[in-house]
Amino acid sequence: MIDPNDKDFTVGIVGAGAMGQGIAQVALTGGMNVILHDVREGAAEAGISAVLKRLARLVEKGKLDEKELAAMRGRAIAASSLGEFSACHLVIEAVFEDLDLKQRVFGEIESAVSGDCVIATNTSSILISSIARASENRGRIAGLHFFNPVPLMRLVEVIRCPETRPDVVDFLVAVGTRMGRTPVVAKDAPGFIVNFGGRSYTTEAMRIVHDGVATPAQIDAVMRDCCGFRMGPCELMDLTGVDVNFPATQVIYSGYNDDPRLKTSFPHRLLLESGQLGRKTHRGNFRYDDKGAMIDPPSPDHVPGAPAAKSVVLCEGGDALKAFAAALGLAVLGSDDGKSPLLASPLGEDCTAFSVRTGADYRRLVAVDLSADTSRRVTVMTAPGADAAARDGVAAAIIASGRSVTAIKDSPGFIAQRIRAMIANLGCEMAQIGVAAPDQIDLALKLGLNYPLGPLEMAETMGAASVLSILANIQALTGEDRYRPSAWLRRRASLGLSIATPD
Ligand code: NAD
């Protein structure tokens, strides 16, 4: 195999669609020769010319040198057939997402290239091993999964099959780096890293909606304001399109033999069946105008109907709860006066279970989620039959301290604990089954999905023992295997080890 940094390095790209063009662009800016082919008459030429136009715009913006662009023009070729691929050192397949088609195209590529040419596919949802099934020399086949739009998305996943040679993996990591991307190496498995690891964010949000605990607007506000996500899960679903994320969820769910951790809920299916696909249909979890701006988004903020409480009684919670009450200016009573709200901050328990376990009067019990950032928004939760004045007394005190309140129905784990614990747990499970190394999982989800923290970093930040308690309590209360803790998490939390500790 040639050195991927050789000045004559030539990459062939099959499929001149959105991804093929994007890959051609980063290959050119990486100084490679590019040969682009598409089965559609004129598509390869049109693809090359579109790429060169985009690069010319970079020259206008002063981001690319005129001379460099001239050199790129000389290094970009549109090929009418794969016969012109014989000099390629690497071929990347980016045709439609169809297994039969990809297997056929792989056969054609194999007969067109030399014996040491590496062959990669950009598939996002098909196992690389299925595409390579009929190939003769599987050691040189791997996945090279770019993200859309390629020039803006820094991440590339290098996917190794059981038969992929280690030097081929190293070769593709070097190619990805030369293309200006950040490569992460993953095992051939449903959804690889990003599409697998990203499932919890939206499926747990849909589950919270399904359970009647909170609305999409409330969930999004909590995930943005308390957990640092740039977009809430429900607006994200609307942006990607339910016609895209529902089938992707199902493929990964069935790819992992219907693991309940990966299951989505009925509200997700209802959006699909009713054609409320998100921004593209002007309706999804929210409503949108022609420009994609949200119309009349429902407020996530609770408006209290009672004045601020003056005092509270603390139920467990320790120093964090004491400090929270003090910051609200609430007097903390040493003994229950029978009137004041009972303030608690449970982990993975709902108010009902907390009240039964501790004997706290459920009518005056007000739970606040202190597991995430409370400087802008606080989630409050009450049991069925609770006294609205107790909740609103606490809510009004929080609002008076300059923060917003999201008031939700009783739920083990509130919103933030549930979603973050599910993300962290799935990241741990990915490490456990060897999809990728912990640092690669974290990097991939931060770069691929803009997460504020990778899933394992999230577990570390929340505290592995806390995440374990949240999940164990939710599993105990719901009886659902969806919430079963990963062995990776349980072992490290139980032994007091860092979550990144290898096996
Ligand atoms: P696209 O529909 O924009 O382009 C596919 C191109 O392949 C078309 O131009 C088509 O003419 C061409 N093609 C079809 N059959 C061919 C053949 N036999 N030989 C040569 N060319 C052929 O699709 P896309 O969005 O660029 O996706 C391409 C691949 O990348 C898919 O496997 C997809 O899953 C994957 N992918 C897509 C995205 C995305 O967001 N679009 C992200 C990551 C990966």
Image (tube, rainbow, N blue to C red):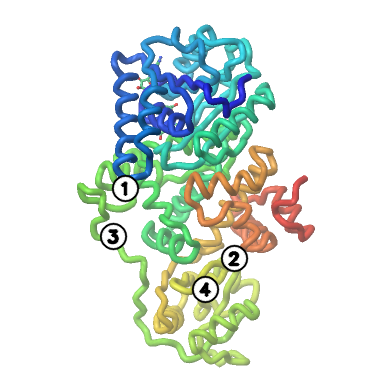
Residue linked to disc 1: 284
**Mark 3–mark 2 distance (CA, rounded to whole Å):** 30 Å
Mark 2 or 4, closer to the camera: 4
Earlier-in-chain disc, 2 versus 1: 1
Instruction: Residue at 61% x, 80% y: name it.
Output: 315
Q: Secondary structure at mark 4?
A: strand
- Do the numbered discs 2 and 1 sit on residues whose CB atoms are within 8 Å? no
Earlier-in-chain disc, 4 versus 3: 3
Earlier-in-chain disc, 1 versus 4: 1
Which amino acid type is shown beneath numbered disc 4? Answer: Val
- Do the numbered discs 2 and 4 sit on residues whose CB atoms are within 8 Å? no
Which of these two is toward me, 80 or 299? 80
Residue linked to disc 3: 297
Instruction: Residue at 45% x, 37% y: name it.
Output: 147
Residue 98 appears in which quarter of the rendering? top left
Quadrant where the image shows the C terminus: top right
Which amino acid type is shown beneath numbered disc 3? Answer: Pro
Which of these two is toward me, 330 or 34? 34
Q: Secondary structure at mark 2?
A: loop
